[in-house]
Amino acid sequence: MNPDEVAAYLKANPEFFEHYAEVVADVMIPHPHGGRTISISERQILTLRERGKQLEAKLGELIHFGEENDAIGEKVHRLALALLCARDLQAVIDAAGYNLREDFAVPQVAITLWHPAAGKDASEATRSFTAGLLHPHCGPLAMADTAILFGEAAPQLKSYAYVALRGKECFGLLSLASGDARRFYPEMGTLYLARIGELVAAALSRHLEAA
């Protein structure tokens, strides 16, 4: 019999361990960390301890992620309150920029609008880029108008996040940037970025439509 057949037999016939308890007690196997042999029961205890440590580490990781999400949720809540309290279009832009810089520690924030009521416009390159954003885009590559968006800081920036601002149609772009190449990267989660974009877009739309 090969090892797989032995394993299959033992799984299918658990009564073996009752009928041949003395055999199980006498079998000695190598210690997983070397140096000596141990009984099967000792090996089982070691396995259970290792699994316990793995579960403990996993639980700690889940708790850590939960605490991080709670902290981010609080920041998003404060941003939402600031946007609700903004009395006009410029106040919304200022509130979004301030909270993203101070609360989320994003060094560079820019909001580009081309809604008729905003009295502003954007290049065709920016409009075309934004129209293609179905989800927030993160990574090391800057869009064409980065120098216009971030001015003198542009040469030092190494990672970017772009979020389209939409109401009935696309009317703007939220751009975030950092000198840290690892701050915004392609594989990062974008759930909160998407929600922030929706909040900012809704606050801007309220004033743009009123105008």
Image (cartoon, rainbow, N blue to C red):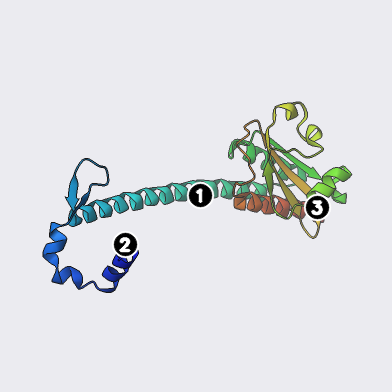
Label 1 – label 2 distance at C-alpha: 46 Å
Mark 2: amino acid: Pro
Question: In the visual, does 16 lie left or right of 116?
Answer: left
Q: Which residue lies under the disc numbered 2?
A: 3
Quarter where residue 101 is shown? top right
Front residue of 145/151: it is 145
Tell me the tag on residue 69: 1
Q: Of the residues shown, which amino acid type is indicated by label 3?
A: Ala
Q: CA distance from mark 2 to mark 3?
A: 60 Å
Residue contact between numbered discs 3 and 1, judged by CB atoms under 8 Å? no
Residue 153, horizontal then vertical, whole percent: 73, 27
Residue placed at 78% from the left, 52% from the top?
Answer: 132
Q: Secondary structure at mark 2?
A: helix
Viewed as shown, does residue 86 lie left or right of 43? Answer: right
Q: Amino acid at mark 1?
A: Asn
Per the rendering, the mark at residue 131 is 3
SS assignment at label 3: helix
